[in-house]
């Protein structure tokens, strides 16, 4: 539900922009504008590269856990057998023969 803020003292985005525009236009100093532009950018708490790595690690963990659960419940084997190379060799041989 959108409230009408015309009679209130709460600032809206448009009102804040109108208040900031005259301040920026009055200062014709280019150094002041560059300082404002630098202040507008903020540092990220977690960089994008770290976020991508975290997502990739979580995907790998989810795949391993899913394979363990699937092999233990549907395959009738031990869950830890998924981590063995011999199990994957048997699975790929089964795929290639069929």
Image (tube, grey):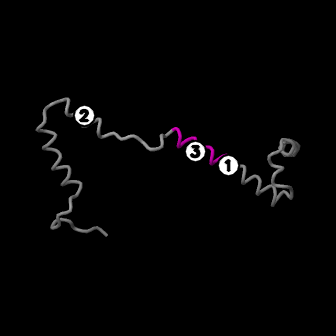
Determine whether the residue tagged by mark 2 lies in a helix, strand or loop: helix
Residue at which label 2 appears: 35
Q: Is residue 59 magenta?
A: yes
> Residue at horizontal 13%, vertical 32%?
28
Within 10 Å of the Cα at label 1, are there few (<14), some (14-19), or many (20+) other Cα atoms? few
Q: Is residue 85 above or below residue 10?
A: above
Give the residue furthest to the left: 26
Q: Which residues are magenta?
A: 49-61
Check contact, mark 1 vs mark 2: CB within 8 A.
no
Q: Is residue 72 above or below residue 27?
A: below
Residue at which label 3 appears: 54
* Residue placed most toward the observer, 97 or 80: 80
Residue at which label 1 appears: 61
| Residue 35 quadrant | top left
51 lies left or right of 8: right
Measured from the top left, where is residue 69 in percent x and y? 76, 57
User: Sequence-wise, which precedes: disc 1 or disc 3?
Assistant: 3
> Residue at horizontal 48%, vertical 43%?
46
- Quadrant in which the N terminus appears: bottom left
User: Sequence-wise, which precedes: disc 1 or disc 2?
Assistant: 2
* Marks 1 and 3, how far apart at CA: 11 Å
Check contact, mark 2 vs mark 3: CB within 8 A.
no
User: Sequence-wise, which precedes: disc 2 or disc 3?
Assistant: 2
Give the residue furthest to the front: 45
59 lies left or right of 37: right
Tag of residue 47: none
Measured from the top left, where is residue 9 in percent x and y? 17, 64
* Marks 1 and 2, how far apart at CA: 44 Å
* Marks 2 and 3, how far apart at CA: 34 Å
85 lies left or right of 16: right
């Amino acid at each position: 539900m959108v409230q009408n803020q015309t009679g209130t003292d709460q600032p809206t985005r448009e009102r804040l922009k109108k208040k900031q525009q005259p301040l920026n236009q009055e200062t014709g100093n280019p150094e002041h504008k560059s300082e404002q532009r630098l202040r507008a950018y903020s540092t990220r708490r977690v960089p994008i590269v770290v976020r991508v790595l975290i997502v990739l690690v979580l995907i790998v963990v989810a795949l391993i856990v899913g394979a363990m659960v699937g092999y233990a419940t549907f395959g009738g084997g031990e869950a830890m057998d998924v981590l063995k190379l011999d199990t994957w060799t048997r699975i790929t041989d089964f795929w290639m023969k069929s």
